[in-house]
Amino acid sequence: MKNKILVFVMMFSLMFTSCSDNFLDNDPTSKIDGIYAFKNEATVDAYRIGMYSQLAYRSNGALYTLYLPLLGDILGEDMVYGNQWYKSYAGEYTFNVDANNSGPWHLWSQAYYSVEMCDNLINRDLSKVKGLSSNKANQYKAEAMVIRAMVLTDIARYFGKAYREDKKYMANPYVDKLLYDPKDPDNITYTKRTSVEDIYKKAIADIKKALELGLKQITKNSDAAFITEQSAHAILARLYLDMAGEVGGAEERVYLPLAKTEAKDAMAGRKLMTQKEYWNGGLSTFNSESILTFQIDKNKMAKWRVFHSFHDNYDGMGDDFVADKRIVENNKWFKTIFKDVTSDGAKVEMAFGDMRKAFFVGEVIAWHKVEKRNVPLTYTGLMSAYDEFNGSSFKTMLKSFVSLSMNPKEYGYYMYGKFPRKDKRMGGDESSNRGSLALGDYSYIRGSEMELIIAECNARLGINETEAISKWKSVASRMWYEGNVLEKNEMGGNDTSFDNVFSHELHYSGKELIDLILLERRKELLGEGHRFRDILRLGLGVDRLLPETGHYGDGLIDIEANDSRLVFPAPQDECDANENITNGKK
């Protein structure tokens, strides 16, 4: 029982020999008991690095680089397991989860490991630590408070009902103090579940107090590896958005203005990626819109147990994770035009539209069926196409896309173009061009989400719809390619600009505008682990029975918004360790 939340004696295995903001330059040394981790500035610095590092690095997968982003989409309807699925998380995917499933256990155990590290730092008297300034002590405590709030609200979305549905529902415990005496670790306090409402209240109070204590601001992109003022405001924006509930709900006029304010504060000093930055793998590393990003080092990661591995279409995790084919093949989602025309006796390829469409790669390319299926793109060519930003590479990808002919064993499309290996190389043979399997940072919070929160709040409140449309357009138009002059002429002189193609949408109002913004959010954040959160807060349910869906077998389900299967049970190991945690009436 030593590794349970209530009987866990903390041994800090993520201590580092030296400390700097680039914590991935440091190597682990040895385990250090918590009693000795606060002796001087160097040990406190190391402890703080370990507090972040354990969120991103675990041999069996970490909370924020595997379990939360993966489950956040597995439980939705837009991502599908492909034909190489080894059936891990089969219970979660089919909403047949009991207390012995690995999903609840991984979320719960890793969350409370993190919370205990935070509580150790928050509740320590750091005033007598040799060499540690009061400003740094306050900053570290503030960061720990935000991490604790973030972790406990993130898992509350799995172990509790949606705030809009039943905020009195008893979810996971909000543990804000050490449950044992460091000098007498066998003397344990057994805690109880906390209501969803109190979890949110405590988290908001924690974050506000952290902002008062003092957090740094993002001044360079890599600062997003740590909790900052911007990420604290972004987490508050998410919480208030959850509390606002579904469109037209009783609480939206209370909480949407708060969510909007926090989202605007989160964008301080941040700006959206450019089209070129996005196309060239911006989401696999720190970028101009990074607000909170979990950094991955190829020498420390478990390459088959990280986020990018599940989106890698060559030799990534066997549990293929693909975008549902109905989304990709429906031109209403990502509008594109590709055709061949004859100009001066020569055949010319013409294209315009949403460049995000070219992020998708059919399962056929991944399994060496390219030549057999007449797909004009090798894997090396696929990786190279994203390295060169121009209309030609966009057309190359679209040509490969339209040449695909999905067969019954292929359920969707990889998203390699959105999450490429960040060290992919140009030139050489295929083996030297691949880069490192699964190597890529995970953007947990980024500017596009905040811009769309602002847009959604305005549209739902029926105020400042001009700003709502402007924010929507800033995200939706960024990846629009309208072709060159020759292409436009050969297409019959059509105006292929974003403003012309979306001339009606630019004047939407009311429900049409709300639906437009929510769809853009769904498109822009596709595959990033946020869909389940939107399903819960908006009361949507999970509908996988739509026409042309790639879901199959037990995954073909339609779950109503308030179905009890949307709530995970507490892990059985936790119930065995603590009589106050049960999976009966909660």
Image (cartoon, helix red, strand yellow):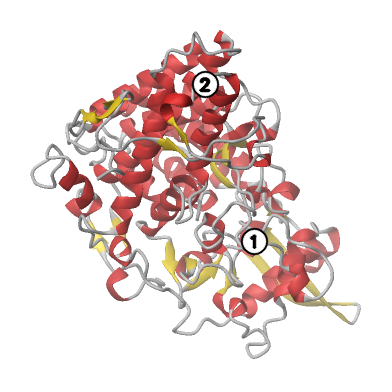
What residue do we see at 84% from left, 69% from top?
427
Give residue 435's quadrant in the image.
bottom right
* Residue 442 seen in render: yes
Residue that sits furthest to the bottom in the current view:
372
Give the residue type that dot 1 points to.
Gly
**Quadrant of the rendered structure where residue 132 is?**
top right
In percent of the image, x 26 and y 35: which residue is there? 163
| Image coordinates for residue 291, horizontal then vertical, percent | 58, 34
> Up-down: is 316 above or below 514?
below
Q: Amino acid at mark 2?
A: Tyr
Marks 2 and 1, how far apart at CA:
37 Å
Residue 421 horizontal side relative to residue 414, left or right? right
Residue 250 visible (yes or no): no
Crowding near the residue tagged with mark 1, few <14, some 14–19, many ≥20 C-alpha atoms within 10 Å? many
Q: Nearer the viewer, mark 2 or mark 1?
A: 2
Q: Nearer the viewer, residue 574 or 315?
A: 574
Q: Secondary structure at mark 2?
A: helix
Which of the pair 176/267 is nearer the observer? 176
Residue 260 point in image, percent of width and height: 47, 26
Residue identified by numbered label 1: 417
Residue at which label 2 appears = 140
Q: In which quadrant is the N terminus drawn?
A: top left
Q: Quadrant of residue 101?
A: bottom left
Instruction: Report crowding for label 2: few under 14, some 14 to 19, many 20 or more residues within 10 A (C-alpha).
Output: many
* Sooner in the amino-acid sequence: mark 2 or mark 1: 2
